[in-house]
Amino acid sequence: MKPAVHALGDPLATAPFYAPAGNECALFELAWRRGLPLLLKGPTGCGKTRFVAHMAARLGLPLHTVACHDDLTAADLTGRYLLRGGDTVWTDGPLTRAVREGGICYLDEVVEARKDVAVVLHPLTDDRRILPLERTGEELAAPKSFMLVVSYNPGYQSLLKALKPSTRQRFVAIEFDFLPPAQEVAVVATESGLPAERVRPLVTLAGRLRALKGHDLEEGVSTRLIVYCASLMVAGLPAAEAVLAAMIEPLTDEPDVKAALIEVAKAVVG
């Protein structure tokens, strides 16, 4: 696959590499222009975060990324009063900064956050597009350049952490999956520098391992892990050792499962 050539000053020239699987780039841009919030759903490591970074660069927008976790509260997003030099000073959180300044606020794995986060997001995901800050008494109106993007992995999350329908239906949604093999080979080759003919067996192996998801494995091999494996091979590590370190060890701690995966890898990669 020949690399794209861009004119000087073209945002695509400096945007993080991303290979579209469909019309997701056009849909993202339309959602941003219409002030619509966007939900990205798909397996871990299939390119959701890279896609958001690519689109932010492509549109020339600041990007505020938050990796959500069990302890993330609404105050972590909106802000809080902090002591500075003996004074109590209000400090904006990433969501508030994005609303004040414009740009994209991306909440990665949003269902991992505490339940009060959804309550804060609701006024930003309807026609009001406002962020009430109870602690400061402010009501911030989001500028036209502001966009809220959230993501989650529906195949991984438990029922206790599923995104509520009342929240999910506030977003335009794009479903992501791993690229078709030929495209995934091209992406891994571009990202790692490993020739496509050497990447191809790695992608084939990833497909075999992904087929085991839900049986012996909780998650399949992500495109990210294939890139890691290929990068180790470019650095000089033998293929078998790179596959073990990047495509098998991260998937399981069970000795029997690991041994079975190694046999699969031997049959595919050698």
Image (cartoon, grey):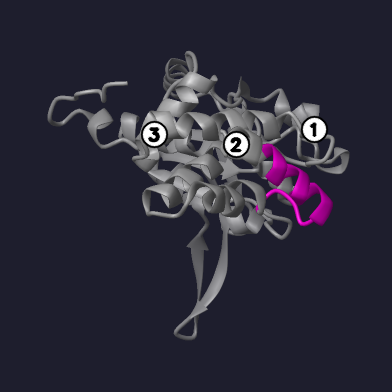
Which residue occupies 66% across, 34% down? 43
Q: Residues within 10 Å of mark 3 (few under 14, many from 20)?
A: many
Q: Position of residue 76 (x, y in %)?
A: 61, 58
- Residue drawn at x 38%, y 45% is 101
- Image quarter hosting the C terminus: top right
Q: CA distance from mark 3 to mark 1?
A: 38 Å
Q: Is residue 41 visible?
A: no
Residue shown at 49%/14% (left/top)?
Answer: 22
**Whole-percent x, y for residue 187 in the image:** 42, 30
Instruction: Give 218 or 129, whichever is nearer the viewer.
Output: 218
Element type where label 3 sits in the image: helix
Task: Tell me which label, 3 or 1, sits earlier in the chain.
Answer: 1
Badge 1 local density, few (<14 within 10 Å), some, or many (20+)?
A: few
Q: Which mark is residue 150?
A: 2
The boundaries of the magenta stretch are: 250-264
Indicate yes or no whether the magenta region holds residue 129.
Answer: no
Left or right side of 70 for 10 = left
Q: Looking at the image, is 207 positioned above or below residue 156? A: above
The one of 181 and 33 positioned closer to us in this rendering: 181
Q: Which mark is residue 197?
A: none
> What is the CA distance from the residue labelled 2 to the residue labelled 3?
28 Å
Tell me if residue 27 comes above or below residue 57 in the rendering.
above
- Label 1, label 2: how far apart the Cα atoms are: 13 Å
Identity, as a three-letter code, of the amino acid under mark 1:
Lys
Mark 2, Cα crowd under 10 Å, few <14 / some 14-19 / many 20+, is many
Mark closer to the observer (2, 3): 3
Q: Which residue is mark 3?
A: 189
User: What residue is shown with label 1?
Assistant: 164
Query: How many labels were placed on the picture?
Result: 3
Quarter of the image for the N terminus: give it: top left
